[in-house]
Amino acid sequence: MVKGNLVSQEYTLSDIALELGGRIVGDGTVSIARVASLSHAKQGDICFINDIKYQKAVAECQASAFVLRENDISLTQKPKIIVENPYVYFAKLSTLLNPPAKSAVGIAENVFIALTANVSASCSIAPNCYIGENVVLGDNVIVGAGSVIENDVFIGANSRLEPNVTIKQKCKIGDNCHIFSGAVIGSDGFGYAQENDVWIKIPQVGRVVIGNNVDIGANTTIDRGALDDTVIEEGCKLDNLIQIGHNCLIGAHTVIAGCVGIAGSAVIGKHCKIGGAAMILGHLEIVDNVTISSGSMITRSITTPGVYTALMPFQPHKEWLATASKIRHLDELANKIKLLEKELALLKSALSN
């Protein structure tokens, strides 16, 4: 199945179907080494088709094989694998053809590990890492260079920290998690009390608890709870540059795109989808299976599943200024309409009499 010690592993279509499923149509002995886009594919590449609108691109494509649905089987005469969901299949196939680089087991030089830490012998710890008191690292955990794991942290088996990740004290991370560079898990939540025009810091004594199979993107920050924990449930996928405030709960298998901000104590349901740069105010609840469009500002709880959007489409600047001016006078216009309705009702009554 794998040819030699090449960086790129080659599989036949039959090998791929045996590993991932799917029905082969055409020559199953065709060798595949790479996944590629329709516009840049060459011999030895495989492409996926998720929409019939790409018919012209498929006809011109130089790929050796395709992944597509049964309904699209006539788009090409080249060898293909027929599956129900080409996009999901392609994700699995790309993983098969591009396995992650293996990290050497063991502890590098210039690593500080506290005597009370419990680090599995199967872990990989890169240079310049700090691992504090009472830390527990499960089997096969990978800690990238320059990462900091403070006291009393637990990280489950097969989880991976890319370089320069910071995990603050007492946080808990599940199995099979992937945390990308620059992420900070468990910084203090933004909590202050005002006394005589002076802000008094409120100690943040909760934790961040992350379930199994969670991905957290680069430079994303998740604040620890003030009293209770901030919780990210299993299967969540968080993009880069996300801010999650203290005491939030993010339900299982929710996906959040980049630059989203979620204020403290918001509760997000399971299987939600939150578009990039959306803002969610604190102390509200969003039920399961809600989709929030990119750039939306959510100011109150959502109690019914569905797709929600809260933004004004862009316009040329002069037109936008005129629109904004009209919006500022909506209350005045509404009052005028109510007055006119009353006058119209009186006129109709007078005419009928």
Image (cartoon, grey):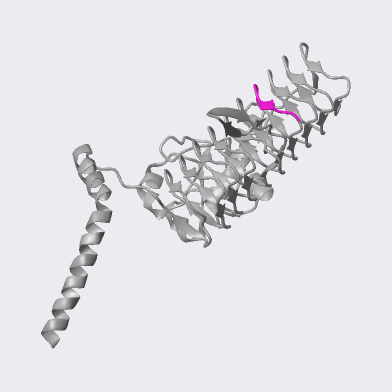
Is 18 in the magenta?
A: no
Q: Please tell me which residue lies in front, 342 or 149.
A: 342
Residue sitting at the far front = 196
Looking at the rendering, the stretch of residues picked out in magenta corresponds to 162-169
Q: Residue at x 70, y 42 (%)?
A: 229
Q: In what quadrant of the picture does the C terminus appear?
A: bottom left
| Snapshot quadrant of residue 265 | top right
Measured as percent of width and height from the top left, residue 314 is found at: 29, 43
Measured as percent of width and height from the top left, residue 35 is found at: 53, 38
Vertically, is 170 above or below 70? above
| Snapshot quadrant of residue 308 | bottom left
Residue sitting at the far left = 351
Measured as percent of width and height from the top left, residue 133 is found at: 83, 24
Q: Please tell me which residue lies in front, 175 or 94.
A: 175
Q: Residue at x 38, y 46 (%)?
A: 59
Is 168 in the magenta?
A: yes
Query: Which secondary structure is most common in the magenta stretch?
Result: loop
Residue 169 seen by the camera = yes
Residue 80 seen by the camera = no
Left or right relative to 311: residue 165: right
Measured as percent of width and height from the top left, residue 212 is found at: 72, 43
Residue sitting at the far bottom = 353
Q: In what quadrant of the picture does the N terminus appear?
A: top right
Vertically, is 64 above or below 303? above
Left or right relative to 208: residue 323: left
Left or right relative to 149: residue 22: left
Q: Please tell me which residue lies in front, 261 or 299.
A: 299
Q: Residue at x 58, y 47 (%)?
A: 266
What is the tally of numbered marks visible in this picture?
Answer: 0
Residue sitting at the far right = 116
Q: Please tell me which residue lies in front, 168 or 314.
A: 168
